[in-house]
Structure formats: C-alpha cells, structure tokens
Image (cartoon, rainbow, N blue to C red):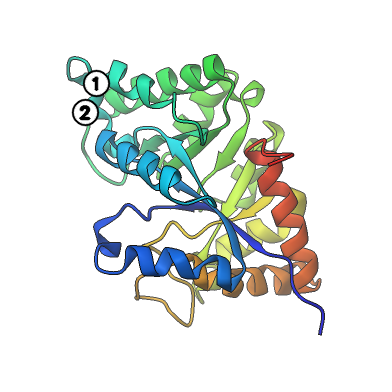
Amino acid sequence: MTELTDIFDTHAHYDDRAFDEDREELLASLPEQAIARVVNVGANLASCKRTVELTEKHDFIYGAIGIHPSETAELEQEGAWQSLRELYGAEKCVAVGEIGLDYYWDEPEREIQKKWFARQLNLARELGLPVIIHSRDAARDTADIMKAERAGEIGGVVHCFSYTKETARTFLDMGFFFGIGGVLTFRNARKLKEAVEYIPLERIVLETDCPYLAPVPYRGKRNSSLYLPCVAAALAEIKGIGEEDVRRTVWENSVRLYRMEGL
C-alpha cells in the first residue's frame, strides 16, 4: 500500500489549557503519526507568548501572532500594541493571526474589533506576512474591511470558513485560502459542504482549531491534529478524488499560504 502524504495542521491552539496534562506527550506523538507540520495560533498577548515558546521547543511547530477579535479590548491598554509588535521578532513566526471580527459575542464593541482588525491587517502588510482571518456572524463587515485595506495584496486564509458558497466567492476573488476542519464531517454542515464543493481544492488547507471542533467520530471530545485524516477523507469524498490527491494538494497549498517554500 502506498504511503500517504504527511499532513500540515495550519491552525491549532496547543498552548490552550486543555492540553496542560499531556501536552508534551501529545506533541511528541504527532510526527510519528504523519503530522509533519503545525502552525500554533495566538489569540491574546499571553497565548502569543506561549506560542513563541512552543515554536522554540519543537522543530515542526511554527507560530502565528495576533489578537483574536474577542480579545481586542486588550489592545486598548497602554503598551499592549508595542508588546505585540515585539513578538514578531520570533524566528518562526509565519503569519499575523488570528485577527478579524466576531459578532457572536457582544464584547468588545464592534467598533473596537473593526479598529484593531484594520490595524493588524496593515501590520501584516508592513511585516510582509499573510493573515489568518477569523470571521463569525460578520461576513459583510469582514469583507468590507478586507477590501478597504486591500487584503488581497496581503494574502492569507479565512480560518474555519463557515459561510455560503456565495460568500466564498468574495474571498476567492481576493485570492485567499480557506481553512477547513472538523465541521466538514458534521451531518448538519450542509452549507459548508456546498461551499467546499464549490471552492477549488487548490484554495483549501486543513486545520483543527484544536482543542475545539473535533470531527466525527470524535465530535464532542478534545480535538487534536491526530484527527485530521478524518477531515481529509471527508474532503476527498466531496471532491470525488482519492485521499492521497487531497493530502498532496493541501500540503502544497499550506506551504504556499505560509510562504514556507524551501523549509
């Protein structure tokens, strides 16, 4: 039997407290299970610092540094923006993220989210890094800000894409990738499955968002990169191609997304 291509988890949160009891044991097991590369993604200043520490400790882990929309009130504090900027000096930082808008929650207020979304987009432009976009219940405002800030020139990925194929077209026109994870395996994910059928495979990358959103048959449990083969298999079924074709293509997409050619 032909050995399958390794998997690249483009969005994980292994700094999360859900991994405190067995983090090192779990991370050590990933390369043995064909999880060859992981990008750990920051959400606030503390998690960004922990992300940098993980990249320094593990050869196969890279980092993204940014403030999640639900945490952007933190950036209103004196010195916070400068503290964030300093973290980009980390050797293995490959993206600005996750940044964006989250209207599911009422805090912080939307104007604060919009302000820091735009500022972090421009920081990514300044640094020459791609962005990881978080957008929840905020498709129109997300797209409007991305257009206003010419995000297509910056490049990146719409993480945990959950909108319709019509909205997917908007982000495709900007040249963005789409992060697809465990939700694709859920029985009630009809809208996402239609969007994934529409999105070219060359614009899809795999992600866990672990410890959240574990795929079927692990739904409701703590997620990890070890479950990504389930997502790859679901993607292969939707696209009507072999799992190896999916794995090979999304690996190449992930490398392009994070501009890691030659690494």
Q: Position of residue 236 (x, y in %)?
A: 72, 70
Q: Amino acid at mark 1?
A: Ala
Label 2 secondary element? helix
Residue drawn where x is 58% and y is 75% of the image = 230
- Quarter of the picture containing the N terminus is bottom right
Q: Nearer the viewer, residue 254 or 15?
A: 15
Q: Are marks 2 and 1 in contact (CB under 8 Å)?
A: yes
**Mark 2 to mark 1: distance in Å?**
7 Å
Q: Is residue 193 left or right of residue 23?
A: right
- The quarter of the picture where the C terminus appears is top right
Q: Which residue is pictured at 49% across the width and 16% down the height?
A: 122
Q: Which mark is residue 22?
A: none
Mark 1 surroundings: few (<14), some (14-19) or many (≥20) residues within 10 A:
few
Q: Is residue 64 left or right of residue 252?
A: left
Viewer-closest of 79 and 25: 25
Q: Identify which residue is drawn at 54% across, 52% down.
A: 60
Mark 1 secondary-structure assignment: helix
Q: Position of residue 161 (x, y in %)?
A: 53, 51
Q: What amino acid type should be assigned to the residue bearing mark 2?
A: Glu
Judge whether residue 230 can be spotted in this image. yes
- In this picture, residue 71 sits left or right of residue 139: left
Which disc, if any, is residue 80? 1
Question: Up-down: is 222 above or below 253?
Answer: below
Q: Quadrant of residue 171?
A: top right
Q: Which residue is mark 2?
A: 74
Point out the tag, 2 or 1, that comes first from the N-terminus.
2
In the depicted structure, whether residue 136 falls above or below residue 197? above
Picture coordinates of residue 138 (x, y %)? 42, 39
Front residue of 57/145: it is 57
At horizontal 64% and vertical 43% (from top left) the residue drawn is 177
Nearest to the eye among marks 2 and 1: give it: 1
Q: Quadrant of residue 158?
A: top right
